[in-house]
Image: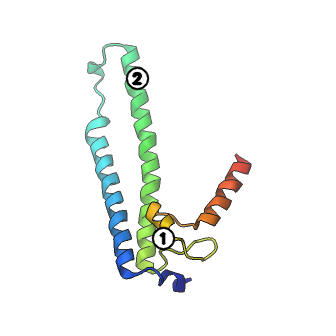
């Protein structure tokens, strides 16, 4: 397993770390901005029930969006831990190397394309 991870060069690992850290920082900035700006709802500014309902809907949508971002943040942190642990770039299902093309598209991925496609087929058959 670790042998496959060694195929990634140090400069590649550094590049992926930088990309992942930037994604993490942007998510955190966005979440902070939401807490500071978007989530303050002053009912005095809403003249009628329709405006208030619309505002509450938007607020609910933002919370769901932030929930997805929280999940994405966990994936980013997991990928950074894999870089530190020397297992970045190795599929967690089959222990084969994940292609560079896939890592460049989704550096937070934990599965090679074959295992990801298998997972999606399984999910689709249950869904």
Mark seen at residue 100: 1
For discs 1 and 2, the disc positioned in front in the rendered view: 1
Q: Earlier in the sequence, mark 1 or mark 2?
A: 2
In this picture, is 123 found above or below 22?
above
* Residue sitting nearer the eye, 42 or 8: 8
Q: Which corner quadrant of the image does residue 12 belong to?
A: bottom left
User: Going by the image, does 43 lie left or right of 57?
Assistant: left
**Residue 78 in the image: x percent, y percent?**
46, 67
Q: Residue furthest bottom?
A: 3
Residue 106 visible in the current orientation: no
Q: Residue furthest top?
A: 48
User: Going by the image, does 55 lie left or right of 2?
Assistant: left
What kind of colouring is applied to the model shown? rainbow
In this picture, is 60 found above or below 117?
above
* Residue sitting nearer the eye, 21 or 10: 10
User: Going by the image, does 123 lie left or right of 7?
Assistant: right
In this picture, is 22 found above or below 5?
above
User: Going by the image, does 122 lie left or right of 21?
Assistant: right
Q: Mark 2 highlights which residue?
A: 54
At 58% from the left and 71% from the top, the residue drawn is 92
Mark seen at residue 27: none
Q: Which SS class for mark 1?
A: helix
At 40% from the left and 16% from the top, the residue drawn is 50
Measured Cα–Cα span from mark 1 to mark 2: 44 Å
Q: Which SS class for mark 2?
A: helix
At 45% from the left and 81% from the top, the residue drawn is 86
Q: Are marks 1 and 2 in contact (CB under 8 Å)?
A: no
Instruction: Report the number of discs.
Output: 2
Rendered-image quadrant of the N terminus: bottom right
Q: Label 1: how many residues lie within 10 Å, few (<14), some (14-19) or many (20+)?
A: few
């Amino acid at each position: 397993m670790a042998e496959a991870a060694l195929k990634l060069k140090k400069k590649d690992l550094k590049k992926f770390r930088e990309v992942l850290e930037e994604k993490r920082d942007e998510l955190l900035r966005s979440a902070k901005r939401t807490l500071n700006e978007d989530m303050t709802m002053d009912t005095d500014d809403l003249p009628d029930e329709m405006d208030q309902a619309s505002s509450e809907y938007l607020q609910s949508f933002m919370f769901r969006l932030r929930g997805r971002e929280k999940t994405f943040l966990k994936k980013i942190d997991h990928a950074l831990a894999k870089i530190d642990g020397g297992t970045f770039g190795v599929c967690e299902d089959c222990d084969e190397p994940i292609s560079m093309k896939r890592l460049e598209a989704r550096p937070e991925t934990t599965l090679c394309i074959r295992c990801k496609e298998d997972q999606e087929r399984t999910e689709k058959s249950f869904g």
